[in-house]
Amino acid sequence: MNRGWLGLAFLASMVLGGCAHTPQPQMQAFYHSPSNAYTLNLSSTALQGHISMSEQCEPYGGSLNLWDSKNRFFRVDYLNFIEHPSVRAPSFANDRTLNELVINYYQNEVITKQKSIRSNKVLFRDTVNSTVGEGLLTIMSLEMYKEAVPPDALDNTVYYGFFIFRRGDYAYIVQHRQEIYQPERMKAMLVTLAQDMTIPGAKAYAPQIGNLSVVDQVFGSQQEINAWKKAMKCDSKGN
């Protein structure tokens, strides 16, 4: 089983520079992200059977990788527009502008830096309404180098979908991988998972460590970042 061969090689190492580890057990059937950015219902109908997870986090955002019992890969990222070093929100930008800013960041800065990806192409892009609000749905084809593809893969092209929406200072990026291009199914999977997120999330962690706020805090030193990771349980002890 080639679990998550694209997900980990593609986005996991690029969007965030922090450590990756398996989340500690939390409330049954729910995942609570650091910074209380969101809570995800793991009983979502988008997911089937046993769920395996890994996460990464930094003060400017976090990522959750999920594989269900059918070996389907999903991912949820959140980016803080205030903290993020690359994705900066223009003053008074509306949601559509911010969603476009985020998808351009993924396409132009994240995907293009992946040595395993030969080329990418946007196949579908549209605005979609959902119970979490208006979001941007984008589906890309990713042509992989043959050496990066497992022997049992259908071919060296996979299809990767993004559903991006904004809440406050955060952009949420729900992602899914397909080996066959099925745009309507991609839309259904992404929107369903997004609608099973609660924003903001449950306050599963202490909100402060000393006088350092861990929510929307502009960090001035690596020491402050390390303190934040410790408070958010994002240090290396889970590796």
Image (spheres, helix red, strand yellow):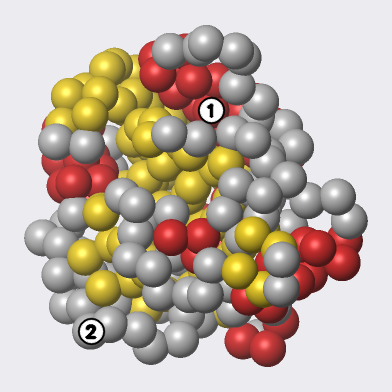
Quarter of the image for the C terminus: give it: bottom right
Relative to 192, say whether 212 is above or below: below
User: Viewer-nearest of labels 2 and 1?
Assistant: 2
Label 1: element kind: helix
Quick one: quadrant of the N terminus? bottom left
- The residue lying furthest to the left in this view is 45
Residue at the spot of label 1:
102
Rendered location of residue 186, percent (x, y): 23, 40
Number of residues whose C-alpha sits closer than 10 Å to that of mark 1, classed few (under 14), some (14–19) or many (20 or more): many
Q: Rate crowding at label 2 as few (under 14), some (14 to 19) or many (20 or more) other CA atoms within 10 Å.
A: few
Residue name at image x 15 percent, y 40 percent: 188
Q: Nearer the viewer, residue 210 or 95?
A: 210
Question: What residue appears at the point 51 percent right and 60 percent down from the top-left corner?
Answer: 35
Q: Is residue 45 left or right of residue 221?
A: left
Measured from the top left, where is residue 112 in percent x and y? 68, 33
Question: Quick check: 58 above or below 144?
Answer: below
Reply above or below: 88 against 23. Answer: above
Residue kind at label 1, given as amino acid type = Val
Which residue bears the numbered disc 2? 28
Q: How many marks?
A: 2
Q: Disc number at residue 19? A: none
Left or right relative to 24: residue 67: left
Q: Residue at x 25, y 46 (%)?
A: 194
SS for dot 2: loop
Q: For residue 25, which quarter of the picture?
A: bottom left
Task: Kindly report the distance in space between the C-alpha atoms of the residues bearing marks 2 and 1.
Answer: 32 Å
| Residue 53 x, y percent position in the rendering | 41, 74
Q: Nearer the viewer, residue 92 or 112?
A: 92
* Residue at 50% from the left image edge and 12% from the top image edge: 93
Q: Which one is nearer the viewer's eye here, 36 or 184? A: 36
